[in-house]
Image (tube, rainbow, N blue to C red):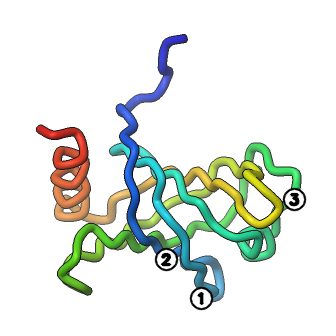
Amino acid sequence: MQERRAARRFACDANVELEGPGGNRLLGRAIDISMGGIGLQLGAAVLEMLNLTPLGGVVGPGTPEVRVRIQLGEAGPADVLTLCGVPRHVRRLSREHYRLGVRLAFENPAQKQALQAWVDRLHGS
C-alpha cells in the first residue's frame, strides 16, 4: 500500500510535553515525526484535555491548538523545540495509552529549520 502523506514519516523516540488549552500539560513520547506532523504516545488524560471520547477516531473541527515541546537532544532546554499544532486523530493503544496525531505549524523559519535538521539526523542524511 502506498503512503499518502505529503511528507515522509520517520520513527523516533523523544520526550515531549503537550500543552493544551488553558495551560494543562501532559508528558509523553514522540513515536514518529515528519515535516508535517508528529505522532505522540500519551496517557488517558489527553482525552480530558482535548475533550475527546475514549473510542478515538478523527478529531473534529474546532479542536483547539496545542503546543508540542520536543526534547531533541541531551543539552537540556537548548535542545527543546516548541511547535504549535492541531490534533487530527486519536487512537487507543491500551487502557492507559493513546496515540495522538498532531498536524504541525511553524511560526517562523527557524522552527522549520530545526525540525528539518532533526528529521535529517533521524533519516541519516
Q: On the rendered structure, is 25 left or right of 62? A: left
Please state which amino acid type lies under the numbered disc 1: Gly
Q: Is residue 59 visible?
A: no
Q: Position of residue 100 (x, y in %)?
A: 63, 55
Q: Earlier in the sequence, mark 3 or mark 2?
A: 2
Q: Would you place residue 35 above or below residue 72 in this image?
A: above
Q: Residue furthest left?
A: 125
Q: Secondary structure at mark 2?
A: strand
Report how far apart the C-alphas of labels 3 and 2 lie in the structure. Answer: 21 Å
- Reading the image, the residue beneath label 1 is 23
Q: Residue at x 24, y 46 (%)?
A: 122
- Reading the image, the residue beneath label 2 is 17
> Callout 1: few (<14), some (14-19), or many (20+) C-alpha neighbours within 10 Å?
few
- Reading the image, the residue beneath label 3 is 54
- Give the label, 2 or 1, closer to the camera: 2
Q: On the rendered structure, is 89 left or right of 31? A: right
Q: Would you place residue 102 above or below residue 49 in this image?
A: above
- Give the label, 1 or 3, closer to the camera: 3
User: In terms of image quadrants, where is residue 98?
Assistant: bottom right
Q: Residue at x 44, y 66 (%)?
A: 84
Q: Secondary structure at mark 3?
A: loop
Please state which amino acid type lies under the numbered disc 2: Glu
Please state which amino acid type lies under the numbered disc 3: Pro
Report how far apart the C-alphas of labels 1 and 3 lie in the structure. Answer: 22 Å
